[in-house]
Amino acid sequence: MTMETLMEDVEYNWADVDLTPIRQPELPRETGERRRGRDIVIAIDHGPSCKFAFDWAIVHLCRLADTIHLIHAVSSLRNEVVCSAAEARMEKLAVEAMNVAMVETKARIVQGDAGKAICKEVERLKPAALVMGTRGRTLFQSIIQGSVSEYCYHNCKSTAVIIVPEQCIYE
């Protein structure tokens, strides 16, 4: 499997995920510069560390008028199996976000190198924070193999909150 490198000045492909069947909260939202709610981006994949980061963000970071943007990076939007699995996961997480924190949720699948595509979305949305999980690798493993969360921490133009899974904290 080869992934195309996303150049810094090149446009990228994306697909919005339709979350209309999910009942969004009916809250008074201000528009313009004096909006009460914040935008929070949560990077999603199919790993358990992503779910732990999502749960942490919902409990510790989100407020009632916030909007959560779920972002999933894939190598190709043409791969229907991966895209449909990502859509299903995002729909489940949107329902959970609504039930637990009563926040509005938007979802988008982006194509390209995960770190660069996530940083492009963060640059476009200008959120209060980017929340993402990490596998809990050692520093040496991250340097040798690379880490999406480390790339985003150093290159995103917004605050990156990296959540280490609970099991890795106590080992």
Image (spheres, rainbow, N blue to C red):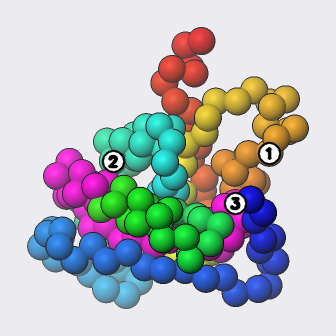
Spatial separation of the CA atoms under disc 2 and disc 1: 27 Å
Q: Is residue 153 above or below residue 55?
A: below
Q: Nearer the viewer, mark 2 or mark 1?
A: 1
- Residue positioned 69% across, 51% down in the render: 148
Pick the front one: 146 or 151: 146
State yes or no: residue 26 in magenta. no
Displayed quadrant of residue 78: bottom right
Q: Secondary structure at mark 1?
A: loop
Q: Earlier in the sequence, mark 2 or mark 3?
A: 2
Which residue in the protein does label 2 denote? 58
Q: Residue at x 28, y 55 (%)?
A: 92
User: Up-down: is 157 above or below 47?
Assistant: below
Residue 29: in sight, yes or no? yes
Q: Nearer the viewer, mark 2 or mark 3?
A: 3
Q: Quadrant of residue 17?
A: bottom left
Measured from the top left, where is residue 114 in percent x and y?
66, 61
Question: Residue at the location (56% across, 75% down)?
Answer: 77
Residue pointed to by mark 3 = 115
* Residue 97 is inside the magenta segment: yes
Please state the extent of the stretch shown in magenta in the rendering: 92-121
The x and y percentages for residue 170 are: 55, 13
Specify the amino acid type for callout 2. Answer: Ile
Q: Amino acid at mark 1?
A: Gly
Q: Is residue 29 left or right of residue 157?
A: left
Mark 2 touches mark 1? (CB < 8 Å): no
Question: Is 110 placed left or right of 48 in the picture?
Answer: right
Question: Which amino acid type is shown beneath numbered disc 3?
Answer: Gly
Question: Is residue 119 something one can see in this rendering?
Answer: no
